[in-house]
Image: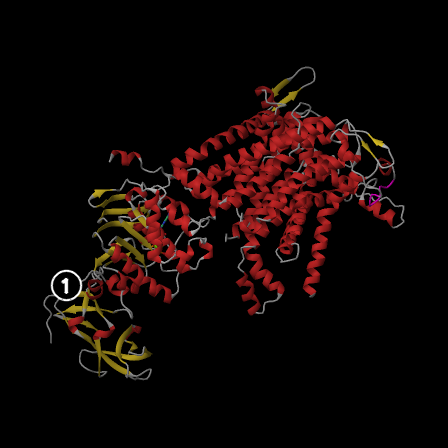
Amino acid sequence: MRRNRYLAIAVVLALLWSLVPIYWFCRMALLTPLEIQQYPWPLFPRAPNVASFWNIFGYDYFLSDGTRVPASGQANQIIRGLYDSIFVSVVVTVLTLLAVLPLAYVFARLEFRFKSVLLFAILLSVALPPVSTLIPFYAMYIRLGLSGTLTGLVIVDLTITVPFVAWMLIGYFRNLPPIERLARMDGYGRLAAFVQLVIPLAKSGIAVAAVIAFLFAWNEYTYALVLVNGSTANTLPTAISGFLFQDPQPANLAASVVVTIIPPALVAYFLQRHVGEMNLVDPVR
Amino acid sequence: MASIDLQGVEKRYGAHHAVRALDMHIEDGEFLVLLGPSGCGKTTTLNMIAGLDAPTAGKILFDGRDVTEISAYRRNVAMVFQSSLLYPHLTARRNIETSLRYSTLSKVEKQARIAETVRMLEIEPLLDKLPSQMSGGQRQRVATAKAIVREPAAFLLDEPLSALDAALRLSLRSELVNLQKRLGTTTVFVTHDQIEAMTMGDRIGVMSGGELQQIGTPDEIYNSPATLFVAGFLGSPPMNLIEGEIAAGLFRSEQLSVPVAAPPGRATLGIRPQDMHLVAPDAAGALPVTVFALEHLGRESIVIAEAHGGLKVRIIVEAGFSAHVGERLGFAPDPARCLLFAQDGTRIPMRASVLA
Amino acid sequence: MASDRARRELSDTQFALAIGMPVFVFLVIVVAYPLGYAIWMSVHKIVFFGGYRSTFTGWANFARVLSDPNFWWSTWVTIRLTFEAVMLTMLLGLALALMLNRPMVGGGLVRTVVFLPWCVSLYGAGLMFAYLARGQTGLGTSIAYAFGSMASVDLMTREVVIEVLAVGAAWTMAPLVAFFLLANLKTIPSRLYDLAALDRLSRFETFWNVTLPPLRYTLFVFTSIITVLSMKLFDFIFVMTGGGPGTTSATLTYQIYKVSFKNLDLGYGAAMSFYLLFFILASTFLLYLVWGRRETRF
Ligand SMILES: Nc1ncnc2c1ncn2[C@@H]1O[C@H](COP(=O)(O)OP(=O)(O)OP(=O)(O)O)[C@@H](O)[C@H]1O
Ligand SMILES: [Mg+2]
């Protein structure tokens, strides 16, 4: 009984810890323009309204007392950013999986020369701070005509997702049972065994890998800011920063941040249901 | 069905010899057991026969045809892996079906084959279960079904029973032998359990340290082991091995003396526990010992006794025998049943024995 | 026979080359070029004003970094922040994982909520924590007001701003750790706990002898990962504090940003980057030496 009470307290604390910052922004998004002028902002909005969620997508909103809350000037940027973010994230997720699955598989299950050197090279690229590679990428992109394009953003995201996800999947693949031997007895070629047997076997680990790649691409800010900002190819995070610099509107800022959390939150819900099936421990020996 | 030949097969991992210079002939339709302690190269040998590992040197022939370079599948062998490996994400049915995935049989024929195998192994109720939902014995059965459904030329089994409990092992043992005899498929069965080897094999190949020590029928292996290793490895309780010296037609070790017909020199005398008998402690030529422990097995008893220099010998006596620990006794081996081994572990052939 | 030979299976190395190499080559090009470019910059003096010029200066940039008080200040800030963020993240991650491993009503919902901060970008989290901690808009002030106090509670001060950053970083990273630890906890057979109960182990002994051993290697791996991530942390600081107040929270990443993008001293920024890279590699190597080497894998 007492143990249950401790657990309950722990759960409440954990929920508070996880939710308070998110609540803070949800609340901010729901405040009326009038409340925003107060000091300090109330803990709970007295007349919650969804005006800012309309405004950021370019619609006026009328409060119950008839006040018009005008559409945000950043709306075009936000809508554009939403499309581009979805595009970039999906493409990066798919390409990351296409690239990482063979790579991680090869490193986890096969013995070949220079393996440890190559593995170290992958680790090294995980350690590179983006702030250091920004300018080289910028210079390279100017030369290749990739700056300000979604292609450029996809490529630069891949340089981070591929090594990071590969690093995680290597440990996962290594712990799978040696079914390739069985597959060879059954007449599968190496590639067929990998595609038709290993991948289906590893699906929960691959799902986690996909989620990690998606979250990264969805949330990436630094590269997007430097490499594509100001062009037509801007992602959601850079579009949002407009509320900070060009057009400061706390409620709209909060609303747009809340919007960015929704797709990954759906993903997180899906992910937690699979947590029991995968043991993605240990990357590198 | 096929006969299998290994000619000078060798497998090296770096500087480590897992298998060295292996020559072996396996008859068509034979049940051959490969027996040896852990790490002696049994699995490696089996993998090379299967085509999963390429030998570093030597040739492998099926029915006289060189298959060394041919892939596992095209050798048409089937294998049951150590601890009955199956695809964990596929049901029993799909596991069995994948064995026929690349076969040229028609759909109907495939289904007929599967149905027959399922009936033979009585795994009907398991078909829609995943391996993780089966018991060890059930998994083993499904793995066997997966192997035989292809009607392979040879059947390779790597310790398929080692993960099971004693009772199940006993029943599956006879089941497997029965199945093999019905199908008449050449079979290589790897184990480190000598009882399994003795009861199942038409012939047994004993391996140690990557080398084939002896290959022969269970009777040959048991009664005339070719090397000291084979003599000591088979039999329970194990053979007594006593070091001594041959001179003038007598093997001597302290007070023990046994007439032998072998050239003089240092040698090891091997005698099975059931081939010694009790005499007075000071009888001429007998081995004086003190009783160390007595094990009653019901049908018979084993006396474990200590001889000179702490050497333990085991003697089987009839069930009624009694003695107290520390009692002095004498044991005399039956000279006709003694085996002699030279310093290098090889057997010294006895010429017509001189019996006293 | 000839066709049999042709059908011989690929060796491990051949297969590895065939399916792994294209990706690897892409990675090398796309990582090696910027790395090479950064090396080139670090040994040049690059001037924008009055026309772009670059002059070879050898080790000068690297030497200059070492006598720069800003660099040493930022190094200290980075160490402090990394240490705090890593400790907080790992402890929180472990606590959350242990809690989530208990059977409870509505477990799926609790798990989703606990993993939620992981979905918030570092950029978004930076904004949230900035608003939460600032006196003007913060939680502290609102609560104080609700209790009738007029005090403005500002946490973005010289004294505690780094701690606030560490808490925010732990908020976003702890779910990642918790997720993998939880996956690991699920593999511990419940028989082991029955055994521990039979042996009358205390709760702490059970934790120490049953729960912890299979987690230790994962804990090591994630301590390394979180260390690397904390040292690389940039967006979060950029959005939340902008290195301030003053230079209180100017980590090395922020310092590099300032040198490269505000002062446009590209060569100098690149040189500083290599010091940071060196620190990152050195600290993971150190972790491996004092901890990872002794952990066996399960
Ligand atoms: N891939 C490998 N690399 C290096 N050495 C190996 C490899 N596979 C096997 N060995 C070594 O070769 C020797 C023989 O191994 P093998 O697996 O054939 O033993 P085994 O007789 O099947 O033993 P067990 O009864 O334990 O299964 C062992 O000493 C082992 O360490
Ligand atoms: Mg073996």
Q: Which residues are magenta?
A: A39-45
Q: Amino acid at mark 1?
A: Pro
Q: Would residue A200 be found to the left or right of residue C204 on screen?
A: left
Q: Is the stretch drawn in magenta largely helix, strand or loop? A: loop
Q: Quadrant of the C terminus of chain B?
A: bottom left
Towards the viewer: B266 or A214: A214
Picture coordinates of residue C259, whole percent (x, y): 69, 28
Q: From what the image shows, is residue B227 above or below residue A190? A: below
Picture coordinates of residue C18, whole percent (x, y): 41, 33
Residue C225: quarter of image: top right
Residue C188: quarter of image: bottom right
Q: From what the image shows, is residue A250 above or below residue A22? A: above
Q: How many marks?
A: 1
SS of the residue under disc 1: loop
Towards the viewer: C161 or C60: C161
Residue found at x 57% / y 27%: C34
Picture coordinates of residue A262, whole percent (x, y): 68, 39
Q: Would residue A64 be found to the left or right of residue C66 on screen?
A: right
Picture coordinates of residue C166, whole percent (x, y): 70, 44
Q: Would residue A80 be found to the left or right of residue C221 on screen?
A: right
Residue found at x 28% / y 81%: B319
According to the picture, the residue beneath numbered tag 1 turns out to be B349
Q: Would residue A16 be found to the left or right of residue C111 on screen?
A: right
